[in-house]
Every structure is written in C-alpha cells, then in structure tokens.
Image (cartoon, grey):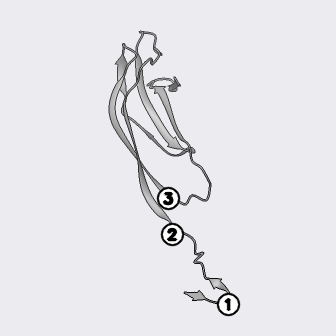
C-alpha cells in the first residue's frame, strides 16, 4: 500500500512471540576435583537461565578419575523476543552428599 503524497507506508507491528528449544548435552567432565574423604566425587551438573528452571543431570557416584561421564540431555523452552533482555546459560558442577549439603565444585 502506497500513498504518493506521504510516501511508502511501513508495517510497524511487533514481531510475534516465537517459542524454541535450547538443548544442552553434557557428555562428561575433565579435571573434576575429589570432594569426598575417600578420594572420590559424586558429581552432577546443574544448568539454568537466570536461576529459572534449574535442571540437573544424573549423578556419577564414586568417580575416582576426575572425569565423570554423563551423556545427558537437558531441554529448555525459551521465547523470543525476551522482554528481560539477554539471558545467560549457567552450568555448575556439584558433589552430591547424602548426609550433609551438596558441595559446588565449579
């Protein structure tokens, strides 16, 4: 649609929200420190965007090599455009403890 006196008419309606998946695959870790007295680690990984929707892998119990294996997939549903602005994916490695609180390794 054009108007010769005013020039071209531009469509400035907002872009519709779109939903998409962010898939994170955790295969394994290297250099994971020993956190238990026996020289082992019960490692697992948590992942989240801005502390929302925290997800975690399964636990690799009694890892003695410092290289726990997971082969685990995490799926996050995100929307765009995001009114909060940029989002940051955070990954953390933890040592699971059954009696006391879990220890964050990195």
Disc 2/disc 1 C-alpha distance (Å): 31 Å
Q: Residue 6, position in %: x, y?
A: 68, 86
Residue that label 3 marks: 79
Marks 3, 2: nearer the viewer:
2
Q: Residue 22, position in %: x, y?
A: 42, 48
Report crowding for label 3: few under 14, some 14 to 19, many 20 or more residues within 10 A (C-alpha).
few
- Which of the labelled discs sits on residue 16, or is there none? 2
For mark 1, give the secondary structure.
Answer: loop
Q: Residue at x 53, y 69 (%)?
A: 15
For mark 2, give the secondary structure.
Answer: loop
Q: Quadrant of residue 41?
A: top left
Image position of 25 with respect to 98: above or below: below
Q: Earlier in the sequence, mark 1 or mark 3?
A: 1
- Which of the labelled discs sits on residue 5, or is there none? 1
* Furthest-left residue in this view: 71
Locate residue 90 relative to residue 83 in the image: left or right: left
Which is nearer the eye, 99 or 105? 105
Disc 3/disc 2 C-alpha distance (Å): 10 Å
């Amino acid at each position: 649609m054009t108007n010769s006196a005013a020039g071209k008419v531009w469509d400035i309606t907002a872009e519709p929200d779109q939903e998409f998946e962010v898939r994170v695959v955790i295969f394994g870790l290297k250099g994971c420190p020993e956190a238990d007295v026996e020289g082992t680690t019960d490692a697992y990984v948590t992942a989240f965007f801005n502390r929302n929707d925290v997800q975690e892998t399964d636990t690799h119990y009694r890892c003695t090599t410092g290289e726990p294996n997971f082969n685990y997939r995490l799926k996050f549903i995100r929307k765009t455009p995001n009114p909060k602005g940029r989002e940051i994916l955070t990954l953390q490695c933890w040592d699971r403890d059954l009696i006391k609180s879990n220890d964050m390794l990195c």
